[in-house]
C-alpha cells in the first residue's frame, strides 16, 4: 500500500498537493456565503427596503446573513487538523464579531485589529496547502473590505466621511473641532 501523496508523512515531508481539511472546506464555503451576503446587502442598500416591491430582497439579505452565521458556527466547532487551519479559525472568530458588531466604531476596531495583526491571519510556507490557505485568507481580507463599504456595518455619518470613502477610520476617533 502506497502512502497518500497529499498528506505529510511521519518524516514531515511537505504535502505535494492541496487537499481540504474539514476547517478549510468549511472556510471555503464561508467565503462563498459571505460574497452572497455582501451582494444581497448591496442590493437593498439603495432601495426603499420597506416598500412591498422589495420585501423579497430584504428576506434574501436576511437569509444570506443567516447562512453566513450558520457556517461560522459550524467552523467554530470544527477541529483543527493541521497548523494551516489556525489562521482560518482566527479569521472566522473575527468575522463573527464583525458581523455581530453593534456600532461602526466596534466594526472598525475589529477591522483595524485584523489589518494590524496580519501575521495572525496569514499562513506562511511554500507548500501547496499553505499557498492555498493563504489565497483563502487573502479572499477573506477582500470580503472584510467589502463589508466595510456597506452602510449596514459602517455608517458613513458615524465615520464622518462620505459613503464609500472610509479609508480613514481614525477620523471618527478624532476630537470634534
Image: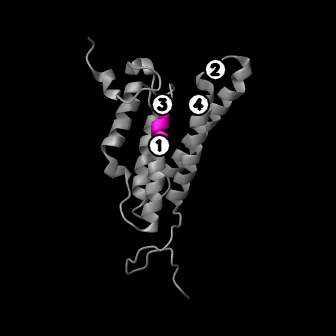
Which is more foreground, mark 1 or mark 4? 1
Of labels 1 and 4, earlier in sequence is 4
- x, y percent for residue 109: 35, 32
Which residue is the extreme one toward the right?
53
Magenta segment range? 143-147
Of labels 3 and 1, earlier in sequence is 1
Question: Which residue is depicted at the point 51% across and 67% down?
Answer: 18
Question: Which residue is depicted at the point 47% across and 46% down?
Answer: 140
Q: CA distance from mark 2 to mark 1?
A: 25 Å
The residue pinned by badge 4 equals 41
The residue pinned by badge 3 equals 149
Q: Would you say 38 lies left or right of 92 here?
A: right
Of labels 2 and 1, earlier in sequence is 2
Above or below residue 138? Residue 128 is below
The residue pinned by badge 1 equals 142
Q: CA distance from mark 1 to mark 4?
A: 16 Å
Secondary structure of residue under mark 1: helix
Above or below residue 124? Residue 40 is above
- x, y percent for residue 128: 46, 67
Magenta span: predominant SS is helix
Looking at the rendered image, the quarter that the N terminus falls into is: bottom right
Mark number displayed over residue 71: none
The residue pinned by badge 2 equals 47
Which residue is the extreme one toward the top?
177
Q: Is residue 113 visible?
A: yes
Q: CA distance from mark 2 to mark 4?
A: 11 Å
- x, y percent for residue 67: 60, 41
Which residue is the extreme one toward the bottom?
1
Of labels 3 and 2, earlier in sequence is 2
Secondary structure of residue under mark 2: loop
Looking at the picture, tell me which residue is in the foreground, 163 or 120: 163
Amino acid at each position: 500500500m502506497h502512502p497518500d501523496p497529499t498528506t505529510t508523512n511521519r518524516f514531515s515531508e511537505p504535502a505535494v498537493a492541496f487537499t481540504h481539511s474539514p476547517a478549510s472546506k468549511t472556510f471555503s464555503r464561508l467565503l462563498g456565503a459571505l460574497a452572497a451576503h455582501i451582494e444581497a446587502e448591496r442590493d437593498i442598500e439603495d432601495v426603499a427596503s420597506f416598500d412591498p416591491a422589495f420585501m423579497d430582497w430584504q428576506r434574501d439579505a436576511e437569509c444570506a446573513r443567516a447562512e453566513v452565521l450558520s457556517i461560522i458556527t459550524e467552523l467554530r466547532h470544527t477541529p483543527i487538523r493541521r497548523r494551516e487551519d489556525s489562521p482560518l479559525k482566527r479569521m472566522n472568530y473575527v468575522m463573527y464579531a464583525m458581523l455581530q458588531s453593534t456600532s461602526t466604531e466596534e466594526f472598525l476596531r475589529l477591522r483595524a485589529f485584523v489589518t494590524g495583526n496580519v501575521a495572525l491571519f496569514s499562513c506562511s510556507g511554500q507548500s501547496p496547502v499553505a499557498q492555498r490557505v493563504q489565497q483563502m485568507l487573502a479572499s477573506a481580507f477582500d470580503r472584510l473590505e467589502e463589508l466595510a463599504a456597506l452602510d449596514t456595518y459602517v455608517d458613513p455619518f458615524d465615520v464622518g466621511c462620505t459613503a464609500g470613502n472610509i479609508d480613514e477610520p481614525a477620523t471618527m476617533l478624532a476630537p470634534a473641532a
